[in-house]
Image (tube, helix red, strand yellow):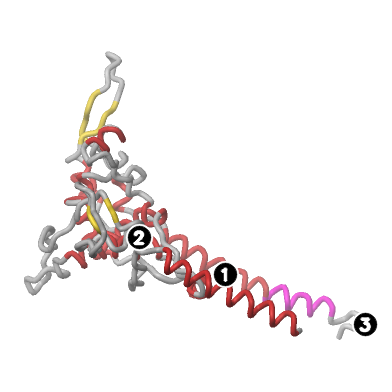
């Protein structure tokens, strides 16, 4: 018993030491946790926030970043931004997509349809890199799942029990407004920028958001639905990118809840069935 306690103590000390070493070896700041409507096993997307986030993506982010895995029709599906089919059809028609070949064997362009996927702003990765200082902007389809950060010991242990899975979206929400002047002693190359949340702190993407850059819809009182600030834009577009990475999250959680209820009921039926069967067997009253 004593040896087990000693082993646990050694592991805990090692974890604390590794966490301290992690903090010292990584200069970037750890993104703060953000409160999201979709957090936890019963969380759901905020439809209004997704609509605002889509507006930010459409007007700002889509100029450089693609959304290759999202079809226009997905915007009208349950659990998403809640656009109507008519709105999605009208939106898709504003884009041109390559199709074909036609009867003459040639490719041609046509207005996009709801079944089409969101077109990329550049024809290929090389063109994207050439237009952005040599660094091709990443596709945004699953970036909220692909990006993350390490919280170190003991926080990742707590994350297991709290079901914290929003590292990626927290990181994006912090990165977008995380631009600032480089501290003394840090040299930022020409065409690069300092971001306190980016790994290595030097990022090629210029600050994409500015206060008042995107106009939100106004409510009944004539005021915007949310503040038109960089912080709000960042949070809204991050929520939209989380939806893009997992558009059927709400359905997944609903199915999981039903399965758990079924398993609980099934376990109870098995228990009472076992008692009924063994009740008349000698020695198992």
Residue 185, by quadrant, is: bottom left
Which residue was labeled with disc 2? Answer: 79
**Residue 161, how many percent across, how many down?**
52, 74
Q: Residue at x 31, y 20 (%)?
A: 101
Q: Is residue 274 magenta?
A: yes
Residue extending farthest to the right is 282
Which residue was labeled with disc 1? Answer: 260
Image depth: mark 3 or mark 1 in front: 1
**Residue 226, how many percent across, how many down?**
17, 69
Residue 150, by quadrant, is: bottom left
Q: Residues within 10 Å of mark 1 (few under 14, many from 20)?
A: few
- Pick the residue in front: 189 or 49: 189
C-alpha span from label 3 to label 2: 56 Å
Tell me whether the residue at label 1 lies in contact with that at label 2, contact meaning CB atoms closer than 8 angstroms. Answer: no
Q: Which residues are magenta?
A: 268-278
- Pick the residue in front: 34 or 93: 34
Residue extending farthest to the left is 222
Q: Is residue 64 above or below residue 268?
A: above
Image depth: mark 3 or mark 2 in front: 2
């Amino acid at each position: 018993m004593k040896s087990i306690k000693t082993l646990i103590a050694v592991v805990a000390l090692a974890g604390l030491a590794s966490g301290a070493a992690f903090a010292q070896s990584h200069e970037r700041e750890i993104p703060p946790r953000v409160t999201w409507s979709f957090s936890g096993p019963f969380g759901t997307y905020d439809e209004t926030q997704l609509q605002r986030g889509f507006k930010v993506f459409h007007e700002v982010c889509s100029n450089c970043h693609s959304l290759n895995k999202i079809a226009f029709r997905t915007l009208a599906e349950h659990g998403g931004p809640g656009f109507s089919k008519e709105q999605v059809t009208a939106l898709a028609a504003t884009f041109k997509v390559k199709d074909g070949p036609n009867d003459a064997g040639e490719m041609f362009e046509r207005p996009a349809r709801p079944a089409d996927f969101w077109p990329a702003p550049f024809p290929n990765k090389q063109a994207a890199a050439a237009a952005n200082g040599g660094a091709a902007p990443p596709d945004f389809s699953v970036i909220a799942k692909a990006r993350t950060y390490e919280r170190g010991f003991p926080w990742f242990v707590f994350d297991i029990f709290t079901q914290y899975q929003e590292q990626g979206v927290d990181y994006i929400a912090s990165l977008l407004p995380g631009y600032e002047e480089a501290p003394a002693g840090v040299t930022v190359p020409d065409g690069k920028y300092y971001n306190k949340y980016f790994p290595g702190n030097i990022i090629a993407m210029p600050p994409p958001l500015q206060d008042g850059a995107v106009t939100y819809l106004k409510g009944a009182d004539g005021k915007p639905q949310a503040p038109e600030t960089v912080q709000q834009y960042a949070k809204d577009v991050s929520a939209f990118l989380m939806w893009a990475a997992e558009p059927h999250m709400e359905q997944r959680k609903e199915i999981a809840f039903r399965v758990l209820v079924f398993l609980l009921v099934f376990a109870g039926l098995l228990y009472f069935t076992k008692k009924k069967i063994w009740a008349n067997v000698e020695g198992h009253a």
